[in-house]
Image: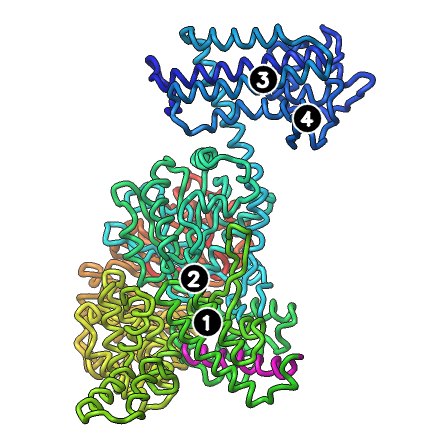
Amino acid sequence: MSWQAVPEGLSEEDHNFLKVYKITVTTIRTVLFYLFTLACPKLPNQSLKGYLQSHPLNMSGSELKKYFDSTQRKKMDADPCGKEFDISLLFVAIKVSCQKLAPLGDSSWTNPSAPPDLEYLLTTNKNFRNNLLHENSNFDLLFVQKWVKELQDLVDKTYLAIGKRYTVDVSKEINLMKDNIDNILNAPLPVPDITQYRQDVKTLLDAIKIDFLVKGQKELETTSDLLTMTDPASFISGRETLRVTLIYTRIDLIEESHGTKAAAGVPVQYEHLLTLLGWNGRIPNVIILEGPAGAGKTTLTKLMLAERVNCLQGLPFSFIGLDKFDFVFPYECSNSDLSSYLDLITYLLPKTTLYLKNNDILRSARQLKILIIVDAADDLNSKSKALLRELLETRVHESGGNLRLICTTRPQALQDLLSMIPKNKLTTAHTKITGIAAHRREEFVTRLHEGMKSEGQSTQETKGLVNYLNRSQGRMGDHFRFPLMLTLLTYLWAADPMSVNGVTTVTALYFAIHRLIQKRLFSRLSKHEKIKDVKNSSEIEECCCKFLKILYQESLISIGLDALILPDRCTCNLKKAADLNGLPQAEVFAAFLSHARKWTAYGYSDQLAGSHKSLLEFYAAFYIVEVITGNIKTDHQLDLERKLVNGGLKKSEKKRIHRELTESKSVTNVLKTNHREISNPLILSKYQNVLLHLMGLLTHRGKDVLHHFHAEVIELMKESVNRHSEGFKSHDASDYWFQVVSEAECDSEVAKTVAENMNKKNRERWDISDSNTRAAVEILKTVSPRIIHILLETDPSTLKYLPLLCDKLSESKCIVIIDDFYSWKNPKKSASDSYFSQISISSNRFRCLFGNFRLCAAISEDMEMLDTLGLVISDDLQIELLKHTLTQTIPVLAKEKLRHFALHIDKSVLASSLPQMMFDIDSFSLVMSHVEDVDVNWTVDVIKALWSAGNSQLSIGFPCSCLSLLGCENLLKELSECSITGNRLRVTSPNITKEEVQSLNTTENDLSLAVFEEGSWLYGPM
């Protein structure tokens, strides 16, 4: 049946429908109007509104608004007789004004009886017209006959009930009804009827949409508010009690390019996530949010949901454009019960959709602006994959831009997600979480720990944790820039500060947390009513260890099935394991797992789930270690050992069994055996994190165990990375290998094997951060990449292996990029020459030098490959040291490859001592930090000293300033008077808002001012 307007003529099906529609509307309206005129005691020329507000009803204005909407009230005034009342208005009018009817709210209006009451028949009449508009059948002649007969039977009963209730003869009305039906069936449809039908349909569908929106927003607001409670380490605390808006610390994002012409690596403020444009300049249908395990993807989406609640409640929110959506739907890909868009809507809005037809739900949704947050696309199962395919292949495209998605994923699943997006239909934008910047990690752990203290989860001093973090950042693994790792570290500190000192790898942290959980569980069980008098402490520990072996195995199975919510089979096995060992299920499940809400035909039910996918991966790695080291024997191994014990075997058979037993204790065999049990193909990319934890756990077992198994593990890692190599950029893959070596505590034999397994792509470019220096040194003993980028965000003096790295660079032939951000930002504390002057390489191998270089010899005219240069002038002495570089060397380099130059001027420098630099360059960034209003004149003098009219690409930054609105006004005024135009000024200050900055920008002085978040540092090409 077509719902669209037919400009020229009608199909046979449309013709049938319109006739049925007209019969239904006129017949039902006629019987309702007959009753209204018969039973409403108002005067003929008196309006219904006037009657209701007069004696004896005396209805107030607020009561009228309760029963009649504004449109209906206007109709009541305009039509005293009610001849033009529609079915909806007549039905309400009858209920509130007619005599001899049951009072409002009486069950007779909604509950059928035998024979049916008049009240119930009236309700059925009112709904009969709506049911027609929801009807999905083909409108052939058979359907028309069936429908008309049902309608005639209903209205017959209604007239007879009216006659009985009011003692009137209704035979004439019944005959007129039948004649009217026959006339409509046999006569051609006039154009006005078609027009009216279309208008009625539109009015009804609009009403359904508005009802869906209003009720749905209210229902979803409650659900979203619950989802904004967060605690990534809830498996330790046992609860999610910390509101995300109270502990959230800014997570850094960058925009990726997918090989298009769009610039990659561009920083993105999370508030602007919804304003990003796709590579083709259009608003993206899908925004991809990529990040490794524990990067904060789910936390960021929870923040968006929390701000959506603020938006609905009229409170401030930071995500620009969030208020443009009618709905923001959260969806977790680990959910294995939803397989369609309709399932998702009814799951999130069960009350709103309870009495709506499926077509009405989807039609209403299609007309509204909806954002769906698809969390963890790397956890797709068969059902959630079907749902996501429906969204990407059908629903998003047909919505005409109304439906948009944000999809979070781990890097290893990125290509799978991209392959599902129809490139010819949808536009995408791709962002990547880079973690919490070094200078914000203190803020993160402080807010989290203070929140824990307020909830009674810690009694430790936050200052001690902050001091430890600041001392240790250089030696902690690169993954400690991510929220989950910092959260776990904070919980470990809260429970046992002394145990934190030995934690330098991800696996070591998980292992310490796992021990903490077990220790707490043992303590609780020793006091448990059902156990304390039955088992002693050693027996409790032994039973828990047996249970854990089953948990480890079921975790590996769940990872293979992409199931964060444990399958029923796994749950059943865990319950059996708890019962067999005499352990209370509730206690052991609460210690190691969490509960997930699942919708069933009987309502919501709780299921066991991993508290975080990373935790299940750690458990899965534990199972592999236990099997290959012989602490857990599989059924197959036990069967083989029984054959050996029973004897009677030939020598060749014994030899075969011994060989099979040996082979069964390999990592590959454990993975393959696991996949035979779950009937899924073995896809190694699923196990990248499992293999990382495995390397860490092997290291914990000692060097002999590590050296025995490491080669096989690395071979599997290489296969897992290469299978999805298109999802890894060269530096992403090198980061993975650095982490592998770090998890092995930089064991030289492991590093050598890693280096030998690196392919050509892995050897293109290495990004070496503070925490990767030791791993890089070990790998450089065997292999060297084409490009090495050293990025330092913490004090280089705390990096024990930085001097060794510089020595290795001297021995290599690679291109070098030095980005000593710490020294550039803190020139009074650190000089880059102290560390990098020992690099003895050809000058033309430097592509970038960024830092606090006090020695003029560090920069030479021979640096033909130098593309980016960042220098600091921290005092007047440094001006003299760098004067030749600034006035002679840089102009020469600018004629070669140099395209980006940045200069950080300290406030202690005399502006009159600065030389004017005359050169033409693509990008010149001048930075003056910690500037206050009293420094405006100094600032202008510095800019005047360094600025040349030929360089219109000057960008000026004021990070960590205390400039106020007045200070910024004076700054713009002074610069304008000096004829300094065509430049960009950027300010970070707690004393001025973005709105105030916008009010300052004018076209008169050709200067644009922008404000950035407090604490942000603007450096490099801006």
Q: Which mark is residue 67?
A: 4
Camera-side mark, 2 or 4: 4
First to last magenta residue range: 507-529
Give the mark nearer the N terminus: 4 vs 1. 4
Q: Position of residue 555 (x, y in %)?
A: 41, 71
At label 2, counting other C-alpha atoms closer than 10 Å, the crowd grade (few under 14, some 14-19, many 20 or more) is: some
Residue 885 in view (yes/no): no
Camera-side mark, 2 or 3: 3
Give the mark nearer the N terminus: 2 vs 4. 4
Residues at circles 4 and 3 in contact by the CB criterion of under 8 Å: no
Task: Label 4: state its secondary structure.
Answer: helix
Q: Which mark is residue 155?
A: 3
Q: Which residue is mark 1?
A: 573
Q: Left or right: where does residue 949 sit relative to residue 928?
A: left
Q: Which mark is residue 1017?
A: 2
Type of the residue with mark 2: Trp
